[in-house]
Image (cartoon, grey):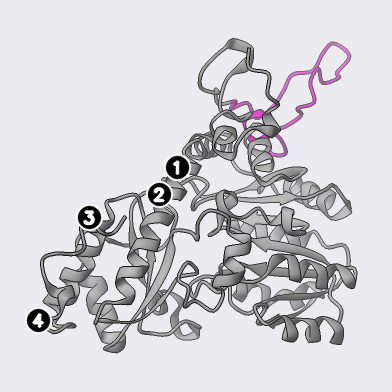
Amino acid sequence: MFQKRFADLSFRTRVVAGPATQDIPRNGLVAPIHMATTYTRDERYAYVSDYVYGRSDNLTLRETEAQIAALERGHSAMLFGSGMAAAAAMVLGLDRPIHVVASSAMYYGLKHWLAGIGRFGHSIEFVDTTDLVALEAAIERRPPRLVWIETPSNPLWQVTDIAAVARLAHAVGAELAVDSTVATPVFTRPIEFGADYVMHSATKYLNGHSDVSAGVLVAARPGDLWARIGMLRADLGTGLSAFDAWLLARGMRTLDVRVRAQAATAADLARRLADHPAVRMVLYPGLPSHPGHAVARRQMRGGFGGMLSIRLEQGVEAALAAAGAVQLWRRATSLGGVESLIEHRASMEGASAACPDDLLRLSVGIEDPDDLYADLDRAFRVLGLIVADHPASSSDTGRGDSR
């Protein structure tokens, strides 16, 4: 009989053999979906289990949350209907008006929402959290109660030093929350670096199949804020549905193999595209030339993620044309699925876009890296974005040398 404790198993094994992956009481290889929205009482009108109502609790939800908490080495987790709902719950759960310091580079939708938290009585300052001197100055100037960072940040993939920020935050009594959607627990577990909370848009890598909208918060330890977030979720009914929680648990069984394959392909594409004559710049933490590479090597263990961005030599029109000319890459918003996506991010973000208008964001799937590179190269060539006699324009796209 296998005696090793679950917590001592490797990450890859824990993903496959976690609490949400099997039906232990009935020896089922796959966990069932528990769809009940209400629960019966006994003759004295007392509940016979600790489940009361589906809006606030559900066994499938609990099992999936336990799986995620275990992967992040956290105390407990809470699932929500989206990443935005999870992030907003952190702010809405605050018990009194406080000051928040947040990364200036982050997902634009959340940044836009955070900019308006003054209506709840809170104040916020956006800071370049990759600049620890600037961050320390902001924290000392007006001590926050909550620090929110995103690393790597979307879509420029800047890297913030979690351990250093945790020390700065805790020195003034603040708590640190980290959006670790892109890194995933495969490569970074922020709680191990001192974070108090971890957030994921579980729609992305945790699910991995572009068919579930979900968000999750993981707490390093219980506390008053964590309790209020739980009450808020129960009162408002913002928890994830049982069916979506089951799909999420199913997707997470392949999390380790998917994310490692995507990161390997992203690293390969980043190296090859960095030498492409149509490309002015590649933004990827795995490249030694990336400003955050040294920090990423310390806190992204085993890989640098499956996201990269490229900026084209001939500007915004070239970027738009290239996105329209690819055949294998799919033009869609989102990231972390098994299919590779390309997006002209400035068009998505609109007039307030913080990213350059010549930037294309690439979410790398699990397709063959040579095919993905060839599709981009072909698009660049048919658009006349490279010279005909450049090595990158030949039919040899590096097959055999890329992995």
- The residue depicted at 11 percent of the width and 71 percent of the height is 394
Give yes or no for contact between labels 3 and 4 (Cβ–Cβ under 8 Å). Answer: no
- Name the mark on residue 257: 1
Task: Name the residue type under label 3.
Answer: Gly
The C terminus: image quadrant: bottom left
Q: Which residue is mark 3?
A: 400
Q: Secondary structure at mark 2?
A: helix
Mark 2, residue position: 261
What is the CA distance from the residue labelled 1 to the residue labelled 4? 38 Å
> Residue sitting at 64 percent across and 71 percent down?
160
Q: Position of residue 269 (x, y in %)?
A: 33, 65
The amino acid at mark 2 is Ala
- Please tell me whether mark 1 or mark 3 is closer to you in this view: 3
Residue at point 34%, 76% (across, down): 274
What's the magenta region?
A: 34-62
17 relative to 343, above or below? above
Is there a contact, CB below 8 Å, between mark 1 and mark 3? no
What residue is pinned by disc 4? 388
Q: Earlier in the sequence, mark 1 or mark 4?
A: 1
